[in-house]
Image (cartoon, grey):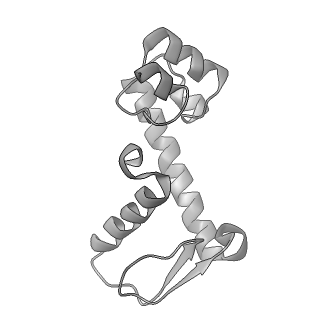
Amino acid sequence: MIDQVNIYEATKLAMKDALSKLSFKPDYLLIDAMKLDVDIPQESIIKGDANSLSIAAASIVAKVTRDKLMIDYDKEFPGYDFAQNAGYGTKSHLQGLERNGVTPIHRKTFEPVKSMCE
């Protein structure tokens, strides 16, 4: 999704999708540094994870969830060290790209993956 619309728009789409899957409609949204085009009162808080306990807690949940996902990807795509580098451009990750090529989970618009796909 990020490759099609950019990370900012993909984040907004993911938030809207999450809202649509709730079994209730929230009374109010606290959002880190962006506005959503939804019919729910909201507050955009710059540096929300530092200025709102609710946003900070959500940030921790998101990081733990992503870390677990990267551990699963490490098993599915061995050789990239995803469990250790969480997908960041570390030496081991870049070496994995050189040895094994690009996987379906790599962002094709980010370097050095973009150059590898051309």
- Specify whether 28 is left or right of 88: left
- Specify whether 58 is left or right of 77: right
**Quarter assignment of residue 60:** bottom right
As drawn, 45 above or below 93: below
Image location (x, y in percent) of residue 55: 59, 71
- Furthest residue in direction front, as rendered: 118
Quadrant occupied by the C terminus: top left
Count of numbered tags: 0
Out of 112 and 38, give the one closest to the viewer: 112
Image location (x, y in percent) of residue 96: 52, 16
Out of 31 and 110, give the one closest to the viewer: 110
- Furthest residue in direction right, as rendered: 50
As drawn, 103 above or below 19: above
Which residue does the image show at 44% across and 12% down from the upper left?
A: 100
Image location (x, y in percent) of residue 97: 50, 18
As drawn, 16 above or below 78: below
- Furthest residue in direction top, as rendered: 99
Which residue does the image show at 39% across and 52% down from the upper left?
A: 5
As drawn, 100 above or below 80: above
Which residue does the image show at 51% across and 35% down from the upper left?
A: 110
- Specify whether 19 is left or right of 68: left
Image location (x, y in percent) of residue 61: 53, 59
